[in-house]
Amino acid sequence: MKPSTTHKKRAPKFEPITLSEQDGVRYLHFGTEWVQGAMRIRRPYSIELEYAQQMMAWMLFIEQPQHIVQLGLGTGALTKFCYREYPEAQITAVELNPNVIEVCRSMFRLPVNDDRLNVIQQDADLFVNELQHRRRLDVLQIDLYDATARGPVLDTPEFYRACAQCLRSTGIATINLFGDHPSFKKNIAAIHTAFDHVLALPEVHQGNIVVIAFKSAPAFDFANLYQRATTIRVTTKLPAHAWVNDIKTVLEAG
């Protein structure tokens, strides 16, 4: 892959979209067995997968975001959740494959665009390199996978630096990686070049590792973080105390 500094549009080759259902959960696939996202049919605005829940760990540090951006739509789980939970925020999702957007709206209850929600059909690399987004975002949620779902399709230092440049000084990116794939070390190294402080949470059972990347290193006040986690748990039912425990474990391990 050429460095993202060339900003050349990738020629898309879209794999067929397939769906499956099991035990009340609908799954999205790109023509393989790998899961690209999930939705519990009775709770379409909840976040089903554990790694996707961890992608919301930025909530511990940012209480009232103004602009949240999702790179890679999947089933729209994070986008829908943020749209519901943050009624004062602008929510943007960037997805290269127009078929994914269509399926999200028809099968995964993604709302249509309005004055707060903007789902864009665009290359994520082009989006983060547009000057209009510089220092405008509070949160970036990055989940960019191909059909095999084993490594991000954008993983260069240039890409992650462009992501960091889109964030305000207190901004945070959460990034979905796979711990048992060769792409993991490459991505971690690239993320470290772009962000002031980087934490890789412990691997969850699906093999995912969620990375929290801070534009500016925060003060880790654990009394405050546990208090914030209680609020998140009560209001959203997300397992925020586990996130704080994981962050504490990672920091103590050095």
Image (cartoon, rainbow, N blue to C red):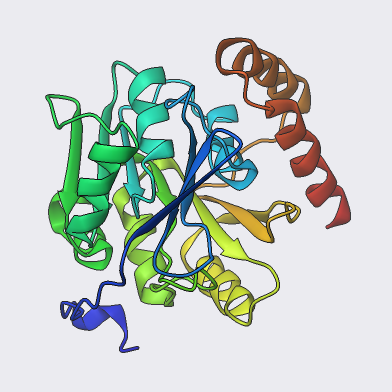
Q: Is residue 126 above or below residue 228?
A: below
Would residue 216 appear left or right of 134 to someone viewing this image?
right
Would residue 247 appear left or right of 211 to someone viewing this image?
right
In which quadrant is the N terminus drawn?
A: bottom left
Q: Is residue 231 above or below residue 35?
A: above
Q: Nearer the viewer, residue 126 or 147?
A: 147
Q: Nearer the viewer, residue 134 or 126?
A: 126
Where residue 244 appears, x then y in whole percent? 74, 33
Where residue 246 appears, x then y in whole percent? 78, 42
Would residue 226 appear left or right of 2 to someone viewing this image?
right
Q: Residue lying furthest bottom in this view? A: 2
Q: Residue at x 34, y 53 (%)?
A: 71
Q: Residue at x 50, y 27 (%)?
A: 46
Confirm whether residue 198 shows in the render: no
Q: Residue at x 64, y 42 (%)?
A: 50
Q: Quadrant of residue 203?
A: bottom right
Q: Is residue 57 above or below residue 33?
A: above
